[in-house]
Image (cartoon, rainbow, N blue to C red):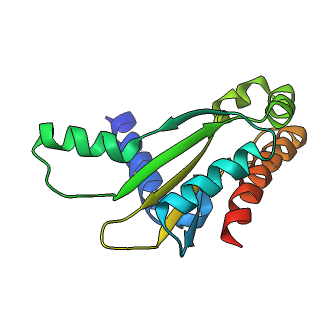
Amino acid sequence: MARLFFSFILLFSVGSSLADVSRDAYMKLYTIQDSYENVHDDLKMAIIGRGVRINNIAHIGEMLHRTGKDLGATKEIFAHAEAFEFCSATVSRKTMEADPHNIVFCPYVIAVYSLPNEKDKTYIAFRRPQAVGTEQSRAALRAVEKLITDIVSELAE
């Protein structure tokens, strides 16, 4: 019984602290005053321009629209929504040489999306990799965040 009580207390305290975490702690969000199509294309070129290959483009908006019908959902969440998945051979190698368990941070993902009724406003967002582990690991993960931030900042300027 005591174990159950302490488990509940732990879950409650973790849940409470997660609710208090600001969005900036785990993600970066940018708003760009331009059409989705322009921002999408600019993001693609910014990634490729760094000599990085895009592994996949996840069509999240299309998936939600398609499956929403099957679920009986009627709310339109996105006008457009995709996520670019990619890795940098040099940055990824350094990250995983520092700690092979850092594999969970690859691929890197940048989402680009627009909301219904927000013409010429596009959002770009990404999860911030948490700098964890040894100092070498933390430095490598900060380099991952810098790479992603540099790509996105190119569009936000």
Q: Nearer the viewer, residue 126 or 60?
A: 60
Left or right of 5: which side holds 82?
right
Q: Nearer the viewer, residue 133 or 1?
A: 133
Rendering coords of residue 72 (x, y %) = 9, 44
Give the answer, above or below, for where 116 lies relative to 13.
below
Give the answer, above or below, for where 39 lies relative to 66.
below
Q: Residue at x 73, y 55 (%)?
A: 151
Rendering coords of residue 94 (x, y %) = 87, 33
Q: Is residue 48 visible?
A: yes
Q: Is residue 130 visible?
A: no
State the residue lying farthest toward the left: 72
Identify the image quadrant of the N terminus.
top left
Q: How many marks?
A: 0
Rendering coords of residue 32 (x, y %) = 56, 72
Q: Residue at x 14, y 54 (%)?
A: 74
Rendering coords of residue 122 (x, y %) = 49, 66
Q: Nearer the viewer, residue 99 or 89?
A: 89
State the residue lying farthest toward the top: 100
Identify the image quadrant of the C terminus.
bottom right
Give the answer, above or below, for where 92 lies relative to 72.
above
Q: Residue at x 86, y 26 (%)?
A: 97
Q: Residue at x 72, y 52 (%)?
A: 46
Give the answer, above or below, for where 89 lies relative to 145.
above
Q: Nearer the viewer, residue 141 or 32?
A: 32
